[in-house]
Image (cartoon, helix red, strand yellow):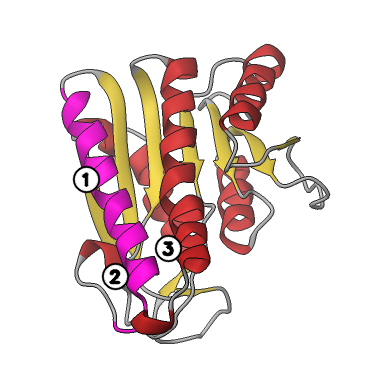
Amino acid sequence: MGEKGLVVITGSNGRLGSVLAAGFLTEGYRVVGLDLPGNETKAWPLIEVDVSSAESIEAAFSEITMRFGVPNSVIHTVGMWGMSPFKETTLQAWNLMLNLNLTSSFLVFRQAILSMGEKGSLIGIVSRQGAVRGAGQQGAYSASKGGLVRLVEAIGAEYEGSDLHVHAIAPSTILFETGQKGGIQATQLLSYCLMLAGDEGRQSNGKILEAFGDG
């Protein structure tokens, strides 16, 4: 165990994050989770972090490097979804959506690169609304995920030719129960993350992998 490298997963105790963390552990990776204070610790070390705070993220990565070494991969799963008619969307709701979905990605990826250097992999979670077309009554969400798509592409272009690779997965509805229809199973997203964190992810940069399933 541990021979495949160190993976940092934000939101590691959330529904998707916990699937990814458990899956990477099973595949022989070391896993460190980042999550909000007070969240239950599972089978991996947890470092408390506020992903809206640059200072908190910097401190978390410093602790990771000191205790566990330099990460090989960082997977950012933190985000939120919401909908409302565009004319009823408040500035507060707009800012919250952009902060959690886009600004947190900027902060996490920036600190990851500062910690890892030009080596390793970064993986973001976008959405069909961001990768293909915005959805009605989801203006803030669509804009935040669309911005994350462009951020991943821009970082990928900047580090093209280096040993740092950044990609994103664009799921439709994420499903967590076996037999559910109308989306993509979380276990399939795990398979895609394993692929992008491995050799295949090192063959390109700035890739947006569409993962719509039957949704």
Instruction: Tell which of 100 and 208 is nearer to you.
Output: 100
Whole-angstrom CA distance, mark 2 to mark 1, is 16 Å
Seen in the image, is 164 located left or right of residue 82? Answer: left
Name the residue beneath numbered marker 2: 129
**Magenta stretch contains residue 5:** no
Callout 3 amino acid: Gln
Which of label 2 and label 3 is nearer to you?
Answer: 2
Residues under numbered marks 2 and 1 in contact, where contact means CB atoms less than 8 Å apart: no
For discs 1 and 3, the disc positioned in front in the rendered view: 1
Q: Amino acid at mark 2?
A: Gln
Q: Percent position (x, y) of residue 28?
A: 58, 35
Quadrant the C terminus occupies: bottom left
Q: Which residue is mark 3?
A: 188
Q: Are marks 2 and 3 in contact (CB under 8 Å)?
A: no
Q: Is residue 86 shown to the viewer in this render?
A: yes
- The secondary structure type at the circle numbered 2 is helix
Quadrant that contains the N terminus:
top right
Q: Sequence order check: which comes first, mark 2 or mark 3?
A: 2
- Specify which label sits upstream in the sequence, 1 or 3: 3
Q: Residue at x 25, y 73 (%)?
A: 134
- Judging by the rendered image, the residue that carries numbered circle 1 is 207
Q: Residues within 10 Å of mark 1 (few under 14, many from 20)?
A: some
Q: Is residue 150 magenta?
A: yes
Query: Is residue 211 visible in this depiction of the protein?
Result: no
Residue 87 percent coordinates (x, y): 36, 82
Q: Start and end of the magenta stretch?
A: 136-160
